Image (cartoon, helix red, strand yellow):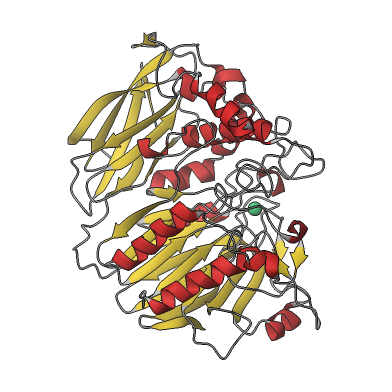
């Protein structure tokens, strides 16, 4: 009943994306309005989303922008010199969407690189590079991408993005924790400028602060991204409409969630299909890189059941095995299964948030698992692995973020049973900055690996993962940064793992 009342209230609010009718078509800005850079995302074979957001003073209320919509023009060209402009058009930076601009440019050529920029009044944006995907039928021989997650700004610098932006990636996945919602803390390298997030304005200022980072801007400018969220884009360890705060009622939390989702949409290069409706927003979606890879981007936060067993470390018990204990929700789960069955890709990639490997985190005879991760939803987790096995889904690779550490896991229907066949491979990428400098090998590493023989690699430095995919082989490079608490850290390749097509499971190279 509470939820219905809440939805009735939301329905009376103005629709997102509808302007107030008053637009400035030829503004004159006192300062550069393109302080947040540009981005592109969600390409398919013929179209891509171009993004920017106007903010003269990004850390001020409304970004220092006037309370009106502003006309913005965009251009897309075959080179960064913009001598041949292929397409251009007008869009609008809507005040109701924080003066963000989302343009879905269509009619493009498959498998092609483009350059784009925006203009508002007499101001011109930085130039971004983007690309379309190959046609689904294209016989591609190589697909290069990176995945990243967890960029708590206060812990240090986004040095990993400097290398990521220098790499030759076709796309980048961001797997969540793009921002953190916490208030400023003492004695860290950088500092949040506002209090714990709740209102739309709070979220806008926080995202603006993160997006002012030049290394993050450079990484967005380099190629299109597919983004998905984890918990901190709203609040730590939330589950669907349940806050982790005791006594927080569902309607109040859904207002919080609606604010957070709205600003996530504003800040990301997402398609119209992701425009939020009140507290709901469609973020799971799929893409193809020719015949080489089917890409399934998941949302493991919006539809999940509450974490069982008090959301800590606990054994896999009846609560985790209950059919009600869903991570994906029924609709997304069916969409995923249909997508995997219909896939024409040599590789099937699940780009998602929380670790699927059933890692026993309690050293010694006791077995305990993270209830916020897939083991807290062990029934659904094992059913999904069984689905992959029984339907002979080819070459499934799971990409994960969330836990600020690197892992390589061979996945079985039940990871506690090493006698079972491996059905998929999981690469968990560490954080960009969350957690500080980190360490290469934690003290418990030997015990951890002994108790979890399906874990092939674990490391606790910062960085990202770079992947090269061919018809016969998948290679993941674990790129790590020696320090992020000071600027100028050095990025090196810490380890590389290979999966051979037709043989699930990873081997070190
Ligand atoms: Fe995180």
Residue drawn at x 36%, y 65% as measured from the top left:
340
| In-front residue for pair 431/196 | 196
Residue drawn at x 44%, y 43% as measured from the top left:
282
**Residue reaching furthest front?**
1
Q: Quadrant of residue 69?
A: top left
**Residue reaching furthest bottom?**
419
Q: Quadrant of residue 364?
A: bottom right
Q: Quadrant of residue 479?
A: bottom right
Residue 38 appearing in the image = yes
Residue drawn at x 44%, y 24% as measured from the top left:
16
Residue drawn at x 82%, y 40% as measured from the top left:
186
Q: Does residue 151 sit above or below 326 in this rendering?
A: above
Q: How many marks?
A: 0
The location of residue 1, given as percent across then percent down, is 62, 32
The location of residue 229, given as percent across then percent down, is 54, 48
Q: Does residue 34 sit above or below 450 in this rendering?
A: above
| In-front residue for pair 496/472 | 472
| In-front residue for pair 328/83 | 328
The location of residue 64, given as percent across then percent down, is 55, 17
Q: Does residue 95 sit above or below 157 in this rendering?
A: above
Residue 271 appearing in the image = no
The location of residue 299, given as percent across then percent down, is 50, 51
- As drawn, is 109 to the left or to the right of 492? left
- As drawn, is 293 to the left or to the right of 227? left
- As drawn, is 83 to the left or to the right of 68? left
């Amino acid at each position: 009943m509470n939820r219905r009342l809440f939805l009735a209230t939301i329905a009376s609010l103005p629709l997102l994306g509808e302007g107030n009718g008053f637009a400035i078509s030829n503004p004159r800005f006192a300062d550069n309005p393109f302080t947040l850079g540009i981005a592109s995302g969600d390409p398919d074979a013929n179209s891509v989303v171009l993004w920017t957001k106007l903010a003269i003073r990004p850390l001020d209320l409304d970004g220092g922008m006037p309370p009106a919509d502003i006309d913005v023009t965009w251009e897309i060209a075959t080179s960064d010199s913009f001598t041949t402009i292929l397409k251009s058009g007008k869009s609008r930076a809507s005040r109701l969407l924080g003066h963000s601009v989302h343009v879905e440019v269509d009619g493009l050529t498959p498998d092609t690189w483009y350059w784009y920029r925006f203009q508002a009044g007499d101001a011109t944006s930085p130039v971004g590079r983007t690309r379309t995907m190959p046609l689904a039928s294209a016989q591609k021989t190589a697909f290069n991408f990176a995945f990243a997650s967890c960029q708590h700004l206060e812990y240090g610098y986004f040095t990993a993005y400097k290398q990521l932006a220098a790499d030759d990636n076709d796309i980048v996945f961001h797997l969540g924790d793009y921002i953190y919602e916490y208030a400023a803390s003492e004695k860290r390298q950088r500092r949040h400028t506002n209090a714990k997030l709740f209102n739309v304005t709070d979220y806008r200022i926080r995202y603006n602060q993160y997006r002012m980072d030049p290394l993050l801007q450079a990484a967005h400018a380099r190629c299109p991204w597919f983004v998905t969220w984890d918990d901190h884009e709203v609040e730590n360890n939330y589950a669907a409409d349940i806050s982790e705060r005791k006594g927080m009622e569902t309607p109040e939390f859904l207002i919080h969630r609606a604010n957070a989702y709205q600003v996530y949409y504003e800040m990301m290069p997402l398609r119209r299909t992701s425009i939020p409706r009140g507290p709901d927003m469609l973020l799971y979606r799929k893409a193809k890189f020719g015949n080489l890879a089917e890409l399934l981007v998941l949302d493991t936060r919006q539809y999940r059941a509450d974490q069982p067993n008090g959301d800590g470390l606990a054994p896999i018990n009846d609560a985790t095995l209950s059919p009600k204990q869903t991570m994906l929700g029924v609709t997304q789960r069916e969409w995923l299964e249909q997508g995997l069955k219909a896939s024409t890709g040599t590789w099937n990639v699940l780009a998602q948030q929380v670790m699927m490997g059933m890692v026993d985190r309690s050293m010694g005879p006791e077995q305990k698992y993270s209830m916020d991760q897939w083991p807290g939803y062990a029934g659904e987790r094992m059913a999904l692995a069984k689905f992959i096995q029984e339907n002979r889904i080819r070459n499934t690779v799971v990409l994960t973020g969330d836990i600020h550490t690197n892992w390589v896991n061979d996945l079985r229907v039940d990871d506690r049973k090493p006698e079972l066949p491996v059905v998929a491979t999981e690469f968990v990428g560490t954080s960009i900055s969350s957690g500080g400098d980190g360490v290469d090998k934690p003290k418990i590493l030997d015990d951890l690996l002994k108790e979890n023989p399906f874990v092939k690699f674990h490391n606790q430095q910062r960085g990202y993962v770079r992947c090269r995919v061919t018809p016969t082989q998948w290679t993941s490079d674990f790129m790590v940064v020696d320090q992020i608490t000071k600027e100028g850290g050095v990025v090196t390749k810490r380890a590389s793992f290979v999966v051979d097509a037709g043989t699930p499971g990873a081997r070190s190279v």
